[in-house]
Image (cartoon, rainbow, N blue to C red):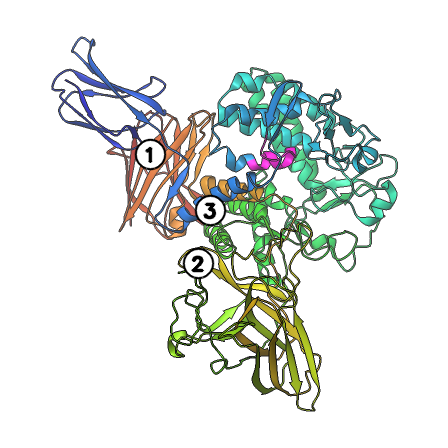
Amino acid sequence: MLTLNAESTNKPLDQIEVSGVDNGRIQVRDGEGRLYIDAAAQSPFTFSAAGSLGAHVVSQLDDQGATIDTASFKVDCKTEIDDGGKFKKLMELLHDTMFIAWHKGYDKGLRIEGKWYQYYVSWIRDHVHCLKGYKYYDADADGLKSGIELYADSQRDDGMIYDKCKKMLHSELQNWRDVEFAEGDFIKPIPDNPQRRWQRVPVENDVEYLWIEGLYYTWKATGDSDWMSNYLDAALKAVHYSTHDRYRWSEKYKLLKRGYTIDTWDFQHQEDVARSGSSMRVDPDKTIFGVMFGDNTGMAVSCRYLAEMLRVAERDDDAKQMESLANEMTERLNKLAWNGKFFTHHVSEDPSVKRDCGGTDESKQVVQSNAYSLNRRIDHDKCVEIIKSYQDIREVMPKTSAGEFYSCFPIFEKGFRHNDYNYMNGGVTTICGGELAHGAFEHGFESYGVDILERLLDWTEKLGGYLHCCLKGKMPEQLPTTYTALDLSAVANVDFDSEASGDVIAWTDEGENDMRHLPTGKQTFEGIEFDVIDPAANDRRACLGMAQADGYASQVTIPVNNKAQSVYFLHTLSGGAAPVGWYTFHYEDGTHKTQYILNENNISSWFMPAPNSAHVGGNEGKKRPPYLRVAWQGPNGKFDNVGMFVYGWNNPHPDKTITSIDVQCAEHNAKWFIAGISLSDQKVVFPDNPISYGIPDMWGAAAVVYALIEGLAGIVDDGLAFDKVRLSPRWSAAGVDKVSASAVYPNSGGYCAYDYQKISNELQLRVASRASDILCSVLLPENASVTQASLNGTELDIQTETVEGSTYLQVPVVELGAQEIRVTLN
């Protein structure tokens, strides 16, 4: 009797053992019924699971080919990378960021005329860019498709695609877009959904090509060519609109045009606002248009995507037209905008117009669409120069920058409402980082791609395990500061623990609900140095407790005898009161200054404090003042969130010696705990919040996901639903010797998975996929060459390809089933 030794669900490449079969043949068919094992029977018989996901059937056949017995097992996998280290962690954090961000308040779907549509973000551009990552995780085929269908079903008769289904506030009958977007019919009510409007930001000229790109991604992930074919006419109409409409097409340059915006964003220079009346509106008769190269590299590659889809639908004449248009646009753009190092940001239709951008040299500006263009099938030589341009930025960018992946660098110093290294004018984005890393892997800069991913992981970990899409491109530089911690040991009277004894006051009488895990000794909180008393070294007296209650102090004098530009207090509160009390600073000349301490102004409660980025007090309009920060948050024995605050006070008389500080509590039942006081020789300053604004975090996380999967792991779908694969593991650039990786479209079950291992001078690559056509292109370690290579035990002629300074071993695979490549290096 045929028996399987297999799990209920097995991964590709798992070993499956067949026993009880001593004669005839063994055949194994995958989830699509395709044969991938056909061998003489023996018991036990072991093979590696491969082929399509789903139910695999093992059959025993007699000598005449008749079936004697069968058994089945399930094969499934998910998108993951497991190197046992940092890239596994990065992959998990990216996944978490994408799905936390999606569920964090973004509008996720709507119903129109009885049909339910859903999306990642209701802007079509955001949705499409998010697809680069979500397609590897989202199993809802209707959900993937409906995000594209939404904008096809609403397409204007002339081919224009709306860019957002705008959700109105419940109180709004009309908003400013209804007025500003009316001219040109860029806004339209939805009759059966009065809280929604179809809108198109008039200045934008990326919408049509992005919708086509989204159709292409969705088609490849779902594997549904019949569905895709239904939208080809809509795609051709969209191209026609973009290349003929007076709002979109430059008759002068025969390329896409737009108003003067920063890169592909939706707000114009102030001088152009004066012409059109709005930062988002254009007037075909008044706006001074120009060519923004990113619109054109995007349209060119989308025409190539569309040609590929048209050929599958056997519409070869239309495909040829799209390919010709892509080639013609590319040739014109290169002549117009390529400057030898990168694409010039904006080429005006009227070169005599000079906008006031402050001291910005626009000819040196590298904008984010250069990073996008790396992955839009432009020439390899141009990709090399763009990558080098970003590396050059790294050498000259502000010292406080998070990285060279700028939305725009150098920034516009004048003319736009964002001119402070934020958002699209000098923000550092994970979008640019992901696209740049992806392009670096593809064009021979593998070590640079690894470096970018490692820095993005560091960025994520420093920001609490969540990858914010945009950081400030320049932070205020911190002046050298000297801190002097005051000694509180003589006045301390409260333990951080709740189990104090004798005349020492416990933090609370609530068991382990206390401050027991607050770090002690010399500590830096929010950039400020304190010396926190270790209770074990001071008879359990860890901090000063002020209250109108037994055992607490109501008034204390702390000697100082020093000058200070500012004073920082590490303190917190139990019970709400205003004021909590006051600090009185006494000076050597007999004068004094009193500072009152108010709840939620100079201090806050130790129990369940909101993080520094959050609103406080349940009031959505209120944030903490800039001189109050959570200094430390952590667990105690009962809860995961208790904390201590730091308050900074600027001394109005820094030239005078402070002789002492009186601490006085107010007449109420609140308890005030002071764990540290430090003097500073600089004015109050806390580290600036590095997080910028304006872009959904999952957009950037998705860009990094596809850089990690398609770039470093090197798994690229070269067909439809992984029926053809280009596999380029680049782990030698990362110094990783052992890794398992898999990329899956949960919608269609298309996948590719592999195990990679390097031991001494031997490389081993085991591969399984839905595809029977795989080009394995394995990056060799630096300065290594191949002395021998084999595929499934058969020695190969050694074929290599060089990309810049990198060498790849080329091994084509043309059969279904598990494949094993072995390589011996010199």
The residue wearing badge 1 is 767
Q: Is residue 509 left or right of residue 436?
A: left
Query: Where is 349 relative to 641, above or below?
Result: above
| Residue found 36% across the figure and 38% down from its top | 799
Does the residue at mark 2 contact the one at mark 1 (Cβ under 8 Å)?
no
Separation (CA) of disc 2 from disc 1: 45 Å
Magenta region: which residues?
Answer: 119-130
Q: Who comes first in sequence, dot 3 or dot 2?
A: 3
Separation (CA) of disc 3 from disc 2: 22 Å
* Identity, as a three-letter code, of the amino acid under mark 2: Pro
| Residue found 78% across the figure and 56% down from its top | 414
Q: Is residue 719 left or right of residue 680?
A: left
The residue wearing badge 3 is 93
Q: Can you name the residue that lies furthest to the bottom here? A: 589
Q: Who comes first in sequence, dot 2 or dot 1?
A: 2
Q: Position of residue 442 (x, y in %)?
A: 49, 42
Element type at mark 3: helix
Q: In terms of depth relative to the viewer, which is nearer, 775 or 73?
A: 73
Q: Which mark is residue 635?
A: 2
Q: Quadrant of the N terminus?
A: top left
